[in-house]
Amino acid sequence: MADLPVQIGQQYEAEIIGISHDGEGVGRVNGFTLFVAGALPGERALVRVGHLKKQYGYAALVEVLEVSPDRVKPDCGIYEECGGCQLQHLSYEAQLRVKRQQVVDNLQRIGKLQVVGEPTLGHLDAGASDEGIVVHPTLGMTDPWRYRNKAQVPFGEEQGGLIGGFYAQGSHRIINMDECLIQHESNDEVVARVKEIGARLGIRAYNEERNDGLLRHVVVKVGFRTGEIMVVLVTNGVEIPRVAEWVAGIRAALPGVKSICHNINVKQTNVIFGDETRVLWGSEVIYDYIGDVKFAISARSFYQVNPVQTEVLYGKALEYAALTGGETVVDAYCGIGTISLFLAQKAGQVYGVEIVEEAIADARKNAELNGMTNVHFEAGPAEVVLPEWTRQGVRPDVIVVDPPRKGCDPALLATILELQPRRVVYVSCSASTLARDLRVLVDGGYGVAEVTPVDMFPQTTHIESVCSLIYKGFN
Protein backbone atom coordinates (compact mmCIF):
# COMPACT_ATOMS: atom_id res chain seq x y z
CA MET A 1 0.00 0.00 0.00
CA ALA A 2 2.76 2.40 -1.03
CA ASP A 3 0.19 4.97 -2.25
CA LEU A 4 -1.13 5.54 1.29
CA PRO A 5 0.08 8.62 3.25
CA VAL A 6 1.44 6.39 6.06
CA GLN A 7 3.58 3.25 6.03
CA ILE A 8 3.74 0.19 8.30
CA GLY A 9 6.48 0.42 10.93
CA GLN A 10 6.89 4.19 10.61
CA GLN A 11 6.22 6.73 13.36
CA TYR A 12 4.02 9.78 12.91
CA GLU A 13 2.49 12.58 14.94
CA ALA A 14 -1.28 12.09 15.07
CA GLU A 15 -4.06 14.44 16.14
CA ILE A 16 -6.61 12.43 18.14
CA ILE A 17 -10.06 13.71 17.17
CA GLY A 18 -12.41 11.14 18.68
CA ILE A 19 -12.85 7.76 20.30
CA SER A 20 -14.16 4.58 18.64
CA HIS A 21 -16.87 2.23 19.90
CA ASP A 22 -14.00 -0.07 21.00
CA GLY A 23 -12.39 2.69 23.08
CA GLU A 24 -9.50 3.40 20.72
CA GLY A 25 -8.45 6.95 19.95
CA VAL A 26 -9.35 8.05 16.42
CA GLY A 27 -6.26 9.75 15.01
CA ARG A 28 -5.55 11.65 11.82
CA VAL A 29 -2.23 11.73 9.98
CA ASN A 30 -2.17 13.60 6.66
CA GLY A 31 -5.94 13.12 6.43
CA PHE A 32 -5.66 9.35 6.99
CA THR A 33 -7.47 7.68 9.91
CA LEU A 34 -5.53 5.61 12.43
CA PHE A 35 -7.06 3.84 15.44
CA VAL A 36 -4.73 4.17 18.43
CA ALA A 37 -5.38 2.17 21.62
CA GLY A 38 -4.77 4.27 24.73
CA ALA A 39 -5.02 7.66 23.00
CA LEU A 40 -7.74 10.16 23.94
CA PRO A 41 -9.60 12.89 22.05
CA GLY A 42 -7.81 16.24 22.11
CA GLU A 43 -4.36 14.70 22.39
CA ARG A 44 -1.41 14.92 20.05
CA ALA A 45 0.50 11.64 20.03
CA LEU A 46 3.50 9.93 18.52
CA VAL A 47 2.26 6.63 17.05
CA ARG A 48 3.77 3.68 15.20
CA VAL A 49 1.73 2.18 12.36
CA GLY A 50 1.15 -1.54 12.72
CA HIS A 51 -1.59 -2.57 10.30
CA LEU A 52 -3.19 -0.88 7.30
CA LYS A 53 -6.42 -1.15 5.33
CA LYS A 54 -7.33 0.94 2.28
CA GLN A 55 -9.19 3.62 4.22
CA TYR A 56 -7.84 3.30 7.76
CA GLY A 57 -5.20 1.63 9.87
CA TYR A 58 -4.09 0.73 13.39
CA ALA A 59 -1.16 2.19 15.28
CA ALA A 60 0.48 1.74 18.67
CA LEU A 61 0.78 4.64 21.06
CA VAL A 62 4.48 5.53 21.48
CA GLU A 63 4.22 8.80 23.42
CA VAL A 64 1.55 11.35 24.31
CA LEU A 65 2.90 14.72 23.24
CA GLU A 66 -0.06 16.83 24.37
CA VAL A 67 -2.13 15.31 27.20
CA SER A 68 -5.91 15.56 27.39
CA PRO A 69 -7.25 17.18 30.60
CA ASP A 70 -9.60 14.19 30.79
CA ARG A 71 -6.76 11.66 31.09
CA VAL A 72 -6.50 9.97 34.51
CA LYS A 73 -4.28 7.27 35.99
CA PRO A 74 -6.10 3.90 35.94
CA ASP A 75 -6.75 2.49 39.41
CA CYS A 76 -6.37 -1.12 38.24
CA GLY A 77 -2.85 -2.56 38.30
CA ILE A 78 -3.43 -4.84 35.30
CA TYR A 79 -5.60 -2.43 33.27
CA GLU A 80 -3.20 -2.20 30.33
CA GLU A 81 -2.97 -6.01 30.04
CA CYS A 82 -6.56 -7.01 30.75
CA GLY A 83 -9.27 -6.64 28.12
CA GLY A 84 -12.16 -6.28 30.57
CA CYS A 85 -12.19 -2.45 30.69
CA GLN A 86 -11.33 0.03 27.95
CA LEU A 87 -11.85 3.49 29.47
CA GLN A 88 -10.20 3.58 32.90
CA HIS A 89 -7.70 6.12 31.58
CA LEU A 90 -10.57 8.52 30.81
CA SER A 91 -12.21 10.52 33.64
CA TYR A 92 -15.72 9.33 34.51
CA GLU A 93 -17.31 12.66 33.58
CA ALA A 94 -15.69 12.40 30.15
CA GLN A 95 -16.82 8.76 29.80
CA LEU A 96 -20.43 9.91 30.20
CA ARG A 97 -19.97 12.60 27.54
CA VAL A 98 -18.31 10.15 25.15
CA LYS A 99 -21.12 7.63 25.56
CA ARG A 100 -23.82 10.21 24.82
CA GLN A 101 -21.87 11.27 21.75
CA GLN A 102 -21.67 7.65 20.64
CA VAL A 103 -25.48 7.48 20.69
CA VAL A 104 -25.79 10.80 18.86
CA ASP A 105 -23.27 9.80 16.18
CA ASN A 106 -25.08 6.52 15.47
CA LEU A 107 -28.51 8.15 15.29
CA GLN A 108 -27.16 10.66 12.77
CA ARG A 109 -24.82 8.45 10.75
CA ILE A 110 -26.76 5.15 10.63
CA GLY A 111 -30.34 6.26 11.34
CA LYS A 112 -30.10 9.50 9.33
CA LEU A 113 -32.03 11.08 12.19
CA GLN A 114 -31.69 14.71 13.25
CA VAL A 115 -30.56 15.37 16.84
CA VAL A 116 -31.06 18.74 18.53
CA GLY A 117 -27.91 20.48 19.73
CA GLU A 118 -28.10 20.55 23.51
CA PRO A 119 -30.13 18.22 25.76
CA THR A 120 -32.96 19.62 27.87
CA LEU A 121 -34.39 18.73 31.24
CA GLY A 122 -37.64 16.84 31.70
CA HIS A 123 -39.23 14.72 28.99
CA LEU A 124 -41.45 15.31 25.99
CA ASP A 125 -44.86 13.79 25.27
CA ALA A 126 -44.91 14.03 21.51
CA GLY A 127 -43.25 12.69 18.44
CA ALA A 128 -40.01 14.10 17.07
CA SER A 129 -40.26 17.82 16.51
CA ASP A 130 -38.99 19.64 13.46
CA GLU A 131 -35.88 20.50 15.48
CA GLY A 132 -34.95 16.82 15.92
CA ILE A 133 -34.51 14.25 18.68
CA VAL A 134 -33.49 15.16 22.23
CA VAL A 135 -30.63 12.99 23.49
CA HIS A 136 -30.29 13.60 27.21
CA PRO A 137 -27.04 13.51 29.21
CA THR A 138 -25.94 9.99 30.11
CA LEU A 139 -27.29 8.83 33.48
CA GLY A 140 -24.17 7.74 35.34
CA MET A 141 -23.31 6.28 38.73
CA THR A 142 -22.37 8.16 41.89
CA ASP A 143 -19.69 5.50 42.48
CA PRO A 144 -18.72 3.86 39.15
CA TRP A 145 -16.84 0.93 40.73
CA ARG A 146 -17.67 -2.50 42.19
CA TYR A 147 -20.99 -2.59 40.34
CA ARG A 148 -20.99 -6.06 38.73
CA ASN A 149 -23.05 -8.76 40.44
CA LYS A 150 -21.74 -11.52 38.18
CA ALA A 151 -18.22 -12.73 37.35
CA GLN A 152 -17.43 -15.30 34.66
CA VAL A 153 -13.77 -16.12 35.16
CA PRO A 154 -11.85 -18.48 32.87
CA PHE A 155 -9.22 -20.70 34.50
CA GLY A 156 -5.89 -21.88 33.15
CA GLU A 157 -2.42 -22.97 34.23
CA GLU A 158 0.85 -21.09 34.41
CA GLN A 159 4.14 -22.73 35.39
CA GLY A 160 2.14 -25.67 36.69
CA GLY A 161 -0.11 -23.54 38.92
CA LEU A 162 -3.83 -22.74 38.69
CA ILE A 163 -4.63 -19.21 37.49
CA GLY A 164 -7.91 -17.38 37.01
CA GLY A 165 -8.58 -13.99 35.50
CA PHE A 166 -9.80 -12.29 32.35
CA TYR A 167 -8.51 -12.51 28.81
CA ALA A 168 -5.94 -10.07 27.49
CA GLN A 169 -7.38 -7.71 24.89
CA GLY A 170 -8.11 -9.56 21.63
CA SER A 171 -6.73 -12.91 22.83
CA HIS A 172 -7.45 -16.03 24.86
CA ARG A 173 -4.42 -15.51 27.09
CA ILE A 174 -5.57 -15.35 30.72
CA ILE A 175 -4.29 -12.46 32.85
CA ASN A 176 -4.16 -13.81 36.41
CA MET A 177 -5.84 -11.43 38.85
CA ASP A 178 -6.38 -10.99 42.57
CA GLU A 179 -9.10 -8.35 42.28
CA CYS A 180 -11.25 -6.67 39.67
CA LEU A 181 -12.35 -3.15 40.57
CA ILE A 182 -15.66 -3.33 38.68
CA GLN A 183 -16.69 -6.60 40.37
CA HIS A 184 -18.50 -6.82 43.69
CA GLU A 185 -15.94 -7.63 46.41
CA SER A 186 -17.65 -10.98 47.05
CA ASN A 187 -16.91 -12.05 43.47
CA ASP A 188 -13.19 -11.40 44.00
CA GLU A 189 -13.21 -13.33 47.26
CA VAL A 190 -14.95 -16.36 45.75
CA VAL A 191 -12.56 -16.55 42.79
CA ALA A 192 -9.53 -16.29 45.10
CA ARG A 193 -10.79 -19.02 47.45
CA VAL A 194 -11.77 -21.35 44.59
CA LYS A 195 -8.29 -20.88 43.13
CA GLU A 196 -6.71 -21.84 46.45
CA ILE A 197 -8.97 -24.85 47.00
CA GLY A 198 -8.55 -26.09 43.44
CA ALA A 199 -4.76 -25.86 43.70
CA ARG A 200 -4.78 -27.69 47.04
CA LEU A 201 -6.92 -30.51 45.63
CA GLY A 202 -4.75 -30.85 42.52
CA ILE A 203 -7.48 -29.77 40.09
CA ARG A 204 -6.25 -29.25 36.53
CA ALA A 205 -7.50 -26.33 34.47
CA TYR A 206 -9.02 -26.84 31.03
CA ASN A 207 -6.68 -26.32 28.07
CA GLU A 208 -8.68 -25.30 25.00
CA GLU A 209 -5.88 -26.13 22.55
CA ARG A 210 -5.45 -29.70 23.82
CA ASN A 211 -9.10 -30.02 24.90
CA ASP A 212 -8.06 -31.60 28.21
CA GLY A 213 -8.08 -30.63 31.88
CA LEU A 214 -11.14 -30.09 34.05
CA LEU A 215 -11.95 -26.58 35.36
CA ARG A 216 -13.07 -24.23 32.59
CA HIS A 217 -14.76 -21.31 34.35
CA VAL A 218 -15.94 -20.22 37.76
CA VAL A 219 -19.15 -18.19 37.60
CA VAL A 220 -20.13 -16.16 40.67
CA LYS A 221 -23.45 -14.39 41.22
CA VAL A 222 -24.22 -12.16 44.19
CA GLY A 223 -27.49 -10.56 45.28
CA PHE A 224 -26.67 -6.93 46.08
CA ARG A 225 -29.73 -6.47 48.31
CA THR A 226 -29.85 -9.97 49.83
CA GLY A 227 -26.11 -10.71 50.06
CA GLU A 228 -26.73 -14.25 48.77
CA ILE A 229 -23.94 -15.84 46.70
CA MET A 230 -24.01 -18.58 44.06
CA VAL A 231 -20.88 -20.39 42.85
CA VAL A 232 -20.97 -22.32 39.58
CA LEU A 233 -18.06 -24.62 38.65
CA VAL A 234 -18.00 -25.17 34.89
CA THR A 235 -16.04 -28.30 34.01
CA ASN A 236 -14.86 -30.29 31.04
CA GLY A 237 -16.13 -33.52 32.57
CA VAL A 238 -19.12 -35.16 34.22
CA GLU A 239 -17.40 -35.87 37.54
CA ILE A 240 -15.38 -33.56 39.83
CA PRO A 241 -12.62 -35.38 41.72
CA ARG A 242 -12.84 -35.01 45.52
CA VAL A 243 -16.09 -33.09 45.09
CA ALA A 244 -17.08 -33.38 48.77
CA GLU A 245 -13.79 -31.75 49.81
CA TRP A 246 -14.32 -29.05 47.16
CA VAL A 247 -17.81 -28.22 48.48
CA ALA A 248 -16.67 -28.33 52.12
CA GLY A 249 -13.73 -26.03 51.34
CA ILE A 250 -15.96 -23.45 49.62
CA ARG A 251 -18.51 -23.52 52.45
CA ALA A 252 -15.83 -23.15 55.11
CA ALA A 253 -14.06 -20.29 53.36
CA LEU A 254 -17.21 -18.48 52.18
CA PRO A 255 -20.06 -18.63 54.71
CA GLY A 256 -22.21 -16.26 52.58
CA VAL A 257 -22.57 -18.87 49.83
CA LYS A 258 -26.14 -20.17 49.47
CA SER A 259 -25.72 -22.28 46.33
CA ILE A 260 -22.91 -24.35 44.79
CA CYS A 261 -23.67 -25.68 41.30
CA HIS A 262 -21.85 -27.77 38.72
CA ASN A 263 -22.29 -27.06 35.03
CA ILE A 264 -20.98 -29.66 32.56
CA ASN A 265 -19.52 -28.43 29.28
CA VAL A 266 -17.52 -31.08 27.39
CA LYS A 267 -17.79 -29.36 23.99
CA GLN A 268 -14.77 -27.79 22.32
CA THR A 269 -16.32 -24.31 22.24
CA ASN A 270 -15.92 -20.75 23.49
CA VAL A 271 -19.45 -20.86 24.95
CA ILE A 272 -19.19 -20.82 28.75
CA PHE A 273 -22.10 -22.99 29.80
CA GLY A 274 -23.02 -26.53 28.79
CA ASP A 275 -26.57 -27.87 28.75
CA GLU A 276 -26.56 -29.69 32.11
CA THR A 277 -26.42 -28.02 35.54
CA ARG A 278 -26.49 -29.88 38.86
CA VAL A 279 -26.82 -28.50 42.39
CA LEU A 280 -23.90 -29.75 44.49
CA TRP A 281 -25.06 -28.05 47.67
CA GLY A 282 -27.66 -25.53 48.82
CA SER A 283 -30.39 -23.86 46.82
CA GLU A 284 -31.05 -24.02 43.08
CA VAL A 285 -31.44 -20.21 43.06
CA ILE A 286 -30.46 -17.08 44.91
CA TYR A 287 -32.63 -13.96 45.22
CA ASP A 288 -32.26 -10.27 44.56
CA TYR A 289 -34.46 -7.21 43.99
CA ILE A 290 -34.92 -4.55 41.33
CA GLY A 291 -36.86 -1.86 43.11
CA ASP A 292 -39.63 -3.65 44.99
CA VAL A 293 -39.67 -6.68 42.66
CA LYS A 294 -38.00 -9.88 43.84
CA PHE A 295 -36.23 -12.19 41.38
CA ALA A 296 -34.98 -15.75 41.58
CA ILE A 297 -31.61 -16.13 39.83
CA SER A 298 -30.50 -19.57 38.66
CA ALA A 299 -27.10 -20.66 37.36
CA ARG A 300 -27.91 -19.98 33.70
CA SER A 301 -30.64 -17.34 33.88
CA PHE A 302 -29.90 -13.89 32.47
CA TYR A 303 -30.06 -11.08 35.01
CA GLN A 304 -28.75 -7.55 34.51
CA VAL A 305 -25.21 -7.34 35.93
CA ASN A 306 -25.50 -3.81 37.37
CA PRO A 307 -28.50 -3.81 39.72
CA VAL A 308 -28.08 -0.16 40.74
CA GLN A 309 -28.28 1.12 37.16
CA THR A 310 -30.87 -1.48 36.16
CA GLU A 311 -33.29 0.28 38.49
CA VAL A 312 -32.41 3.58 36.78
CA LEU A 313 -32.82 2.02 33.32
CA TYR A 314 -36.17 0.41 34.11
CA GLY A 315 -37.36 3.53 35.87
CA LYS A 316 -36.76 5.50 32.68
CA ALA A 317 -38.56 2.81 30.63
CA LEU A 318 -41.50 3.05 33.03
CA GLU A 319 -41.52 6.84 32.67
CA TYR A 320 -41.52 6.59 28.87
CA ALA A 321 -44.35 4.02 28.94
CA ALA A 322 -46.46 6.70 30.71
CA LEU A 323 -48.69 4.12 32.38
CA THR A 324 -51.83 5.21 34.25
CA GLY A 325 -52.95 1.78 35.48
CA GLY A 326 -55.21 0.46 32.75
CA GLU A 327 -52.88 -0.06 29.79
CA THR A 328 -52.08 -3.32 28.04
CA VAL A 329 -48.32 -3.68 27.62
CA VAL A 330 -46.35 -6.18 25.53
CA ASP A 331 -42.73 -6.92 26.48
CA ALA A 332 -41.32 -8.41 23.29
CA TYR A 333 -37.97 -9.71 24.61
CA CYS A 334 -38.97 -10.42 28.20
CA GLY A 335 -36.23 -12.84 29.34
CA ILE A 336 -36.92 -13.89 32.93
CA GLY A 337 -39.52 -11.14 33.24
CA THR A 338 -37.43 -8.32 34.69
CA ILE A 339 -38.95 -5.43 32.69
CA SER A 340 -42.38 -7.12 32.50
CA LEU A 341 -42.75 -7.36 36.27
CA PHE A 342 -41.34 -3.88 36.78
CA LEU A 343 -44.01 -2.48 34.40
CA ALA A 344 -46.76 -4.69 35.82
CA GLN A 345 -46.69 -2.59 39.00
CA LYS A 346 -48.29 0.26 37.01
CA ALA A 347 -50.03 -1.46 34.06
CA GLY A 348 -53.40 -3.14 33.64
CA GLN A 349 -52.06 -6.23 31.87
CA VAL A 350 -48.57 -7.17 30.72
CA TYR A 351 -47.83 -9.83 28.11
CA GLY A 352 -44.23 -11.06 27.92
CA VAL A 353 -42.80 -13.12 25.09
CA GLU A 354 -39.35 -14.69 24.78
CA ILE A 355 -37.94 -17.33 22.45
CA VAL A 356 -36.04 -19.17 25.21
CA GLU A 357 -38.44 -21.54 26.98
CA GLU A 358 -36.22 -21.85 30.06
CA ALA A 359 -36.40 -18.07 30.53
CA ILE A 360 -40.19 -18.11 30.26
CA ALA A 361 -40.35 -20.77 32.98
CA ASP A 362 -38.24 -18.48 35.19
CA ALA A 363 -40.45 -15.49 34.33
CA ARG A 364 -43.58 -17.35 35.44
CA LYS A 365 -41.88 -18.34 38.70
CA ASN A 366 -40.85 -14.71 39.29
CA ALA A 367 -44.43 -13.52 38.72
CA GLU A 368 -45.65 -16.09 41.23
CA LEU A 369 -42.87 -15.10 43.65
CA ASN A 370 -44.19 -11.52 43.63
CA GLY A 371 -47.88 -12.46 43.66
CA MET A 372 -48.45 -10.69 40.33
CA THR A 373 -51.51 -12.01 38.48
CA ASN A 374 -51.73 -9.36 35.75
CA VAL A 375 -48.80 -10.85 33.78
CA HIS A 376 -48.92 -13.54 31.10
CA PHE A 377 -45.80 -15.12 29.61
CA GLU A 378 -45.45 -17.20 26.45
CA ALA A 379 -42.47 -18.79 24.71
CA GLY A 380 -41.87 -18.25 21.01
CA PRO A 381 -40.73 -15.65 18.46
CA ALA A 382 -42.36 -12.30 19.22
CA GLU A 383 -43.30 -11.75 15.58
CA VAL A 384 -45.31 -15.01 15.70
CA VAL A 385 -46.82 -14.72 19.19
CA LEU A 386 -47.93 -11.06 18.94
CA PRO A 387 -50.26 -11.59 15.94
CA GLU A 388 -51.75 -14.62 17.71
CA TRP A 389 -52.43 -12.51 20.79
CA THR A 390 -54.04 -9.91 18.51
CA ARG A 391 -56.38 -12.58 17.10
CA GLN A 392 -57.29 -13.37 20.71
CA GLY A 393 -58.28 -9.75 21.28
CA VAL A 394 -55.12 -8.36 22.88
CA ARG A 395 -54.58 -4.74 21.75
CA PRO A 396 -51.32 -3.36 23.13
CA ASP A 397 -51.22 0.30 24.11
CA VAL A 398 -47.47 0.06 24.68
CA ILE A 399 -44.85 -2.30 23.24
CA VAL A 400 -41.50 -2.52 25.00
CA VAL A 401 -38.50 -4.06 23.23
CA ASP A 402 -35.15 -4.89 24.83
CA PRO A 403 -33.46 -6.91 22.08
CA PRO A 404 -30.00 -8.49 22.04
CA ARG A 405 -27.07 -6.64 20.48
CA LYS A 406 -28.18 -7.56 16.95
CA GLY A 407 -31.34 -5.49 17.41
CA CYS A 408 -34.96 -6.28 16.64
CA ASP A 409 -35.94 -8.96 14.15
CA PRO A 410 -37.24 -7.22 11.00
CA ALA A 411 -40.43 -9.29 11.24
CA LEU A 412 -41.04 -7.91 14.74
CA LEU A 413 -40.60 -4.32 13.53
CA ALA A 414 -43.13 -5.05 10.76
CA THR A 415 -45.53 -6.46 13.36
CA ILE A 416 -45.18 -3.34 15.53
CA LEU A 417 -45.95 -1.13 12.53
CA GLU A 418 -48.98 -3.27 11.75
CA LEU A 419 -50.31 -3.17 15.34
CA GLN A 420 -49.62 0.58 15.73
CA PRO A 421 -49.46 0.80 19.54
CA ARG A 422 -49.55 4.39 20.77
CA ARG A 423 -46.14 4.06 22.40
CA VAL A 424 -43.01 2.03 21.80
CA VAL A 425 -40.26 1.98 24.41
CA TYR A 426 -36.98 0.74 22.96
CA VAL A 427 -34.29 -0.38 25.43
CA SER A 428 -31.02 -0.88 23.58
CA CYS A 429 -27.55 -2.24 24.33
CA SER A 430 -26.24 -1.28 20.87
CA ALA A 431 -26.39 2.29 19.60
CA SER A 432 -25.85 1.16 16.00
CA THR A 433 -28.73 -1.33 15.83
CA LEU A 434 -30.93 1.10 17.79
CA ALA A 435 -30.33 3.72 15.09
CA ARG A 436 -31.05 1.20 12.33
CA ASP A 437 -34.33 0.07 13.93
CA LEU A 438 -35.46 3.61 14.75
CA ARG A 439 -35.14 4.49 11.09
CA VAL A 440 -37.61 1.69 10.24
CA LEU A 441 -40.07 2.79 12.92
CA VAL A 442 -39.84 6.46 11.94
CA ASP A 443 -40.43 5.59 8.29
CA GLY A 444 -43.47 3.60 9.47
CA GLY A 445 -45.13 6.53 11.20
CA TYR A 446 -43.49 6.87 14.62
CA GLY A 447 -41.86 9.96 16.05
CA VAL A 448 -38.83 9.65 18.32
CA ALA A 449 -39.55 11.87 21.29
CA GLU A 450 -36.29 11.43 23.19
CA VAL A 451 -33.43 9.15 24.05
CA THR A 452 -31.70 8.73 27.43
CA PRO A 453 -28.34 6.92 27.57
CA VAL A 454 -27.78 4.98 30.80
CA ASP A 455 -24.27 3.94 31.86
CA MET A 456 -24.70 0.31 32.89
CA PHE A 457 -21.00 -0.52 32.42
CA PRO A 458 -18.67 2.21 33.74
CA GLN A 459 -15.00 1.98 32.69
CA THR A 460 -16.03 0.13 29.49
CA THR A 461 -17.22 1.35 26.09
CA HIS A 462 -20.67 -0.24 26.39
CA ILE A 463 -23.73 2.00 26.62
CA GLU A 464 -27.43 1.28 27.06
CA SER A 465 -30.17 3.64 25.93
CA VAL A 466 -33.89 4.03 26.46
CA CYS A 467 -35.90 5.57 23.64
CA SER A 468 -39.45 6.92 23.64
CA LEU A 469 -41.47 6.66 20.41
CA ILE A 470 -45.05 7.79 19.84
CA TYR A 471 -47.25 6.92 16.87
CA LYS A 472 -47.99 10.11 14.97
CA GLY A 473 -51.52 8.99 14.16
CA PHE A 474 -52.40 9.57 17.83
CA ASN A 475 -51.06 13.14 18.03
Image (cartoon, helix red, strand yellow):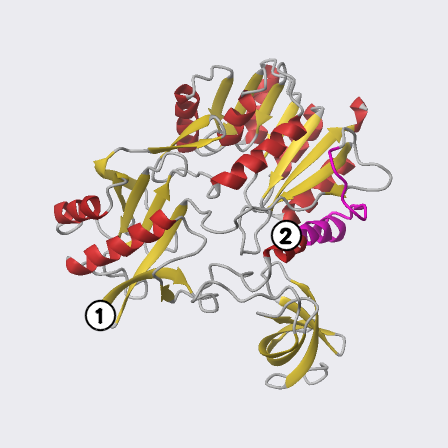
Could you say which quadrant of the image residue 177 lies in? bottom left
Residue 415 percent location from the top left of the image: 65, 29
Residue situated in front as seen by the camera: 367 or 445: 367
What is the secondary structure assignment of the residue under circle 1?
loop
Residue 323 vertical position relative to residue 260 in the rendered view, above or below? above
Residue 77 vertical position relative to residue 221 in the rendered view, above or below? below
User: Per the image, is 40 magenta?
Assistant: no
Q: Residue sitting at 35 percent across and 38 percent down?
A: 227
Q: Residue sitting at 67 percent across and 83 percent down?
A: 12
Residue 3 percent location from the top left of the image: 72, 83
| N-term-proximal mark, 2 vs 1 | 2
List the residue tagged with mark 1.
160
The answer to whether one can see residue 461 in this image is yes
Residue 131 vertical position relative to residue 171 in the rendered view, above or below? above
Residue situated in front as seen by the camera: 307 or 110: 307
In the picture, the quarter occupied by the N terminus is bottom right
- Quick check: 181 left or right of 73? left
In the picture, the quarter occupied by the C terminus is top right
Disc sitting over residue 96 in the figure: 2
Q: Residue sitting at 65 percent across and 32 percent down?
A: 425
What is the secondary structure assignment of the residue under circle 2?
helix
Q: Residues within 10 Å of mark 1 (few under 14, many from 20)?
A: few
User: Per the image, is 117 magenta?
Assistant: yes
- Quick check: 429 left or right of 184? right
- Quick check: 307 left or right of 6? left
Q: Give me the C-alpha separation between circle 2 and circle 1.
A: 43 Å
Q: Over which residues does the magenta segment extend? A: 100-123
Residue 133 percent location from the top left of the image: 78, 41
